[in-house]
């Protein structure tokens, strides 16, 4: 795990935005439009190339992927097998584009010396790789043994990297609970353990005709058309009140699935709640259920922005403490937070606690608690709140602000 602290506006969320931005480019292979780049003000200007890079592990192999682009073309793109600072990085491929939009590719010695290498390289440079598209997806989809590393790297972006914003909702949760009995049992046990009043999770299913009725046939037909075009056969939708539903093709019938919760009243009788009747904290905990399971059982990397949002400090600390103590967890959890209650050396190693702070030019510096001499018995929460490690709000002369000086009009 890793936690990232910092004042409001320090750039914590921008780290996640940048990763999400890079993932979208890689998975789609399309560069963002000029208008998108102009809206992303932390890139400052479209006249200067933007550069993004990430080091990650996929299929137990460490990789470095880097991308430099303008508003018109991919200027540089490269993938290396990382030496992790202990040995030299090994080239998988490099790609560059000149001012005339001509693309040049360079591959590993093994690829270049293989009889098929030069032929495939020529086809890629002259026909397949476009100046305004990234090449990692193209190389990965060729499914060539010589390009196995590109396939593994691309699959990490596509399947193993998940970024969750504060307002993001998991799609298809009702369907997953309905078809996966083990996940349903796991989710129900967790929600009961949280002591939020939920005793059971129910999935209500109705044929689409019964759900929409005769008065909404146009809406129903539009939904069925979208479902038919969906490659997964599953479609998430939201009601006017904001509640999520799932439309699923099951055999010859389209059904609507809706998640509800069951509580018990003072007489011991079951009472069914809609999700909209649950607290924000309870719903947020349910939103995390797929992520918690994936981190435990899969080689996944989850980035969660404001992990403590709407959740009690003691509850989120106990939950993260369970992950920290579980040696069987296969995934990685990285999150931003303002919750100082989590600054506990029994929960995190020093290299798992990071801080974000703005420099004099408005850029974000990231540094870990390892940069400080910290004894294993010291109260790092107290030290952080007192400003010992930086990354806290600077309130200037807020205490001198005269509220009564303003003549507010009703």
Image: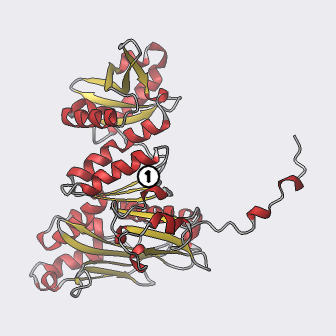
Please name the residue that numbered disc 1 is placed on: 307
Residue 261 in which image quadrant: top left
Q: Is residue 30 visible?
A: no
The residue at 71%/69% (across/down) is 396
Q: Quadrant of the N terminus?
A: bottom left
Q: Is residue 172 visible?
A: yes
Q: Identify the residue at the far front of this view.
A: 377
Q: Indicate the position of residue 315 as horizontal and vertical percent values.
A: 40, 45
Q: Indicate the position of residue 252 as horizontal and vertical percent values.
A: 23, 23
**In this orientation, which residue lies closer to the viewer: 401 or 15?**
401
Name above or below for residue 107 compared with residue 324. Answer: below
The residue at 24%/27% (across/down) is 250
Name above or below for residue 402 compared with residue 396. Answer: above
The residue at 46%/23% (across/down) is 218
Q: Indicate the position of residue 242 as horizontal and vertical percent values.
A: 50, 33
Relative to 24, is 90 on the left or the right?
left
The residue at 51%/58% (across/down) is 338
**In this orientation, which residue lies closer to the viewer: 132 or 12?**
12
So how many labels did they put on this image?
1
Relative to 340, is 393 on the left or the right?
right
């Amino acid at each position: 795990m890793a936690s990232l602290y910092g004042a409001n506006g320090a750039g914590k969320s921008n780290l996640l935005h940048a990763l999400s931005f890079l993932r979208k480019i890689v998975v789609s292979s399309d560069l963002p439009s000029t208008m998108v780049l102009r809206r992303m003000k932390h890139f400052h200007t479209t006249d200067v190339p933007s550069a993004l890079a990430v080091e990650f592990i996929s299929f137990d192999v460490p990789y470095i992927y880097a991308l430099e682009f303008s508003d018109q073309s991919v200027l540089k793109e490269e993938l290396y097998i990382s030496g992790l600072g202990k040995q030299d990085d090994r080239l998988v491929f490099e790609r560059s584009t000149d001012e005339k939009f001509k693309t040049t590719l360079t591959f590993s010695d093994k690829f270049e010396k293989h009889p098929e290498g030069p032929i495939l390289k020529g086809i890629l440079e002259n026909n397949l790789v476009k100046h305004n598209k990234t090449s990692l997806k193209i190389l990965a989809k060729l499914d060539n043994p010589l390009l196995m590393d590109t396939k593994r790297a691309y699959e990490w972006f596509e399947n193993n990297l998940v970024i969750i914003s504060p307002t993001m909702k998991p799609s298809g949760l009702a369907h997953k609970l309905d078809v996966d009995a083990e996940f349903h049992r796991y989710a129900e046990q967790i929600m009961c353990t949280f002591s939020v009043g939920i005793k059971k999770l129910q999935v209500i299913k109705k044929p689409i005709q019964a759900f929409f009725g005769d008065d909404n046939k146009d809406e129903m037909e539009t939904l069925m058309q979208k479902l038919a075009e969906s490659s997964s056969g599953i479609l998430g939708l939201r009601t006017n009140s904001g509640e999520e539903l799932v439309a699923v093709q099951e055999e010859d019938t389209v059904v609507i699935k809706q998640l509800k919760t069951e509580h018990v009243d003072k007489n011991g009788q079951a009472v069914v709640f809609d999700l909209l009747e649950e607290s924000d904290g309870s719903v947020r905990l349910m939103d995390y259920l797929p992520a918690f399971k994936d981190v435990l059982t899969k080689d996944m990397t989850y980035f969660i922005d404001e992990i403590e949002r709407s959740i009690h400090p003691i509850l989120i600390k106990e939950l993260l403490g369970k992950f920290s103590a579980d040696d069987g967890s296969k995934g990685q959890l990285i999150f931003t937070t303002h919750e100082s209650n989590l600054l506990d050396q029994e929960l995190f190693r020093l290299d798992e606690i990071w801080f974000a702070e703005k420099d004099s030019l408005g850029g974000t510096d990231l540094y870990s608690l390892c940069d400080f001499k910290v004894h294993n018995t010291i109260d790092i929460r107290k030290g952080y709140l007192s400003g010992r490690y930086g990354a806290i709000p600077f309130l200037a002369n807020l205490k001198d602000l005269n509220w009564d000086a303003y003549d507010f009009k009703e």
